[in-house]
Image: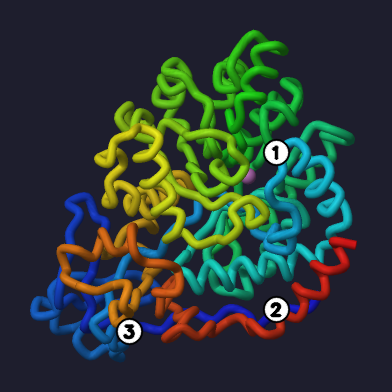
Amino acid sequence: MMKESGTTAGGDLLIVDVTAITMDARGSVCPDAAIAVQGGEIAYVGPARELPADLAGLPVYHGKGRVAIPGLVNAHTHAAMTLLRGYADDLALQEWLTTMIFPAEAKLTAEDVYWGTLLACAEMIRSGTTCFADMYFFMDAAAEAVDASGIRASLSVGMTSFGDAAQKLSDALDFCRRWNGAAGGRITTMLAPHAPYTCSPEFIGDVIAEARRAELCLHTHLSETVREVQQAQAEWGKSPIQHFESLGVFELPVLAAHCVVVDAQDIEIMAKHDVRVAHNPGSNMKLASGVAPVPTMLSRGVVVGLGTDGAASNNNLDMIEEMRFAGLLQKVHAGDPTALPAGECLRMATMGSARCLRLESAIGSLEPGKKADIVLLDLDMPNMEPALPERLVSHLVYSACGLNVSTVLVDGRILLDDGCLVTIDAEKVAREIRRRAASLAQ
Ligand code: NI
């Protein structure tokens, strides 16, 4: 398999002349900040004038007056679906899946998944995402792309119980054994039973037993559409969430994508078991799945992060746009402009998503001891003015776009430098993608 350049460790550096939006528990915004990076971790973030003397000698990276935020975390995607971007739009979900997406996916090779994932990594890095949760197939190839790009990811093999389910589960466990903690710790893994409607109760039981044995979290799709809930009621006399609870799924740590069609009882179940939700407003809008009751979930203490879902149903992987979608969708749905304010959207895309991936002790905020996954955004662009410190969170959510991102670090390693991708040959990726996408569509 063709591979991009391999991984190198991040150097120590001192980012100066930035305004830091830390997303720590106090929501600190620090103008005239310095951020010291040592051994891939944040050693200091705060006022430049209070920088400890022993950190003052680190090599300087000029922030040029930019704003620094924690790297955005995409809590649910199918990265290689970038190959299918624009291939099938404006169709009903079932028709979209069965007549277009599934037949094209059946033709995918491991090399396609490698290049599709690498394109996704390029797009995510370019737009300020430093970590993502992925569920797809040929995941060894996806992991190779993650390794080569320098991004962080929680990877899982999507499993259904159609065909040889035992073999699928065994292969997924092998994948987890091979890749958990790989790429210098940047790759973590989960087990991913695709959804209640694609996994039999017996298979779910096997997945739970193996996940418990291997100490793995689960990544699944849950309560995405009215049709899914109606089917569950008809088949089991329960909502999908009640069904999964009765099977014991929630005795494990679970990341559940969507949770759009949920009632008060479902939300109580999620809160009770600390089921963590990846909200995907762009995909939910494009596929007309509905509106997840995010404010209610948050008020009940459910952890909610933000994801893009795959590029065939979004159609980009821009988490900044996703924050705006999240806010605007709740406002128009509730008929209430106070619903889901900007700060809450930014929290979902950072700490919320980090919690979804169970990585909250390592990423999601700019704090000493956390990984140096840092994004700098250009304030020197018309859409970011007036760039007053107290307006920056508003600008980030309501006015910015991915192209405002100028610099991205993961583990202290620079992956995007002044708008230029460092680890990925974007032209080569584009050539491969166009050729492969055209042949998949034939
Ligand atoms: Ni999905």
Q: Secondary structure at mark 1?
A: helix
The residue that label 2 is drawn on is 429
Which residue occupies the foreground of this view, 123 or 254? 123
Image quarter where the N terminus lies is bottom right
Q: Amino acid at mark 3?
A: Leu
Is residue 346 among what the camera can see? Answer: yes
Question: Which residue is at a point 73% across and 63% down the rendered structure image?
Answer: 83
Question: Quadrant of residue 205 in the image?
Answer: top right
Q: Amino acid at mark 2?
A: Val
State the separation of the CA atoms marked 2 and 1. Answer: 29 Å
State the separation of the CA atoms marked 3 and 1. Answer: 48 Å
Tell me the tag on residue 299: none
The residue that label 3 is drawn on is 13
Question: Which residue is at a point 21% across and 73% down the rendered structure image?
Answer: 387
Q: Amino acid at mark 1?
A: Leu
Q: Is residue 127 left or right of residue 324?
A: right
Question: Which residue is at a point 47% across and 80% down the rendered structure image?
Answer: 416
Image quarter where the C terminus lies is bottom right
Q: Quadrant of ligand 1?
A: top right
Question: Quadrant of residue 410 in the image?
Answer: bottom left
Foreground mark, 3 or 1, reads 1
- Residue 157: percent from the left, percent from the top? 71, 48
Q: Secondary structure at mark 3?
A: strand
Task: Check if mark 2's residue and mark 1's residue have beta carbons within 8 Å.
Answer: no
Q: Disc 3 or 2, which lies upstream in sequence?
A: 3
- What colour scheme was applied to this rendering of the protein? rainbow
Q: Is residue 254 left or right of residue 310?
A: left
The residue that label 1 is drawn on is 93
The local crowd at label 1, few if under 14, some if 14 to 19, many if 20 or more residues have their Cα within 10 Å, is: some
Q: Secondary structure at mark 2?
A: helix
Ligand 1 neighbours mark 2 (CB distance < 8 Å): no
The local crowd at label 3, few if under 14, some if 14 to 19, many if 20 or more residues have their Cα within 10 Å, is: many
